[in-house]
Amino acid sequence: MPVAQIFMIKGRTEEQRKAVIEKVTAAISEAVEIPKESVRVWIQEVPSTDWGVAGQTAKDLGR
C-alpha cells in the first residue's frame, strides 16, 4: 500500500487539499497499476514561520 506524505505551507482551502489528495491518489494508482483504494495520502500543513527557504522563513518571503 503506497503512502504519500505531502508537506505544504498552511493556508490552502479544504477544496484545494481535497484536490491534491484526489490527484496524487490517481497518479500513484495509475503509475503502479493498483486500485485507488490501496493508496493513502497524508497532508501535513506547516506554518509559514516554520518553513525555510534560502535561509529565511516563508512568511518573511511573503508566502
Image (spheres, rainbow, N blue to C red):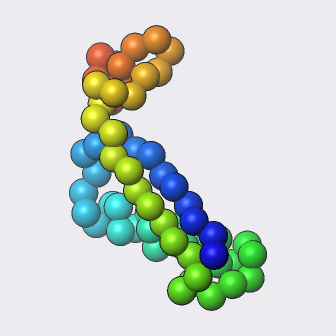
21 relative to 29, above or below: above
| Residue 37 pos. (x, y %) | 54, 86
Q: Is residue 47 visible?
A: yes
Answer with left or right where residue 53 lies relative to residue 47. Answer: right
Answer with left or right where residue 20 lies relative to residue 28. Answer: left
The quadrant of the picture occupied by the C terminus is top left
What's the residue at 30%, 30% (across, down)? 48
What's the residue at 46%, 73% (across, down)? 22
In this orientation, which residue lies closer to the viewer: 41 or 11? Answer: 41
47 relative to 38, above or below: above
Q: Is residue 62 visible?
A: no
| Residue 28 pos. (x, y %) | 64, 71
Quarter residue 56 falls in: top left
What's the residue at 28%, 25% (across, down)? 49
User: What residue occupies the far top of the structure in this picture?
Assistant: 55
Q: How many marks?
A: 0
User: What residue occupies the far front of the structure in this picture?
Assistant: 1
| Residue 4 pos. (x, y %) | 56, 61
Quarter residue 14 falls in: bottom left
15 relative to 45, above or below: below
8 relative to 35, above or below: above
The quadrant of the picture occupied by the N terminus is bottom right
What's the residue at 33%, 27% (across, down)? 50
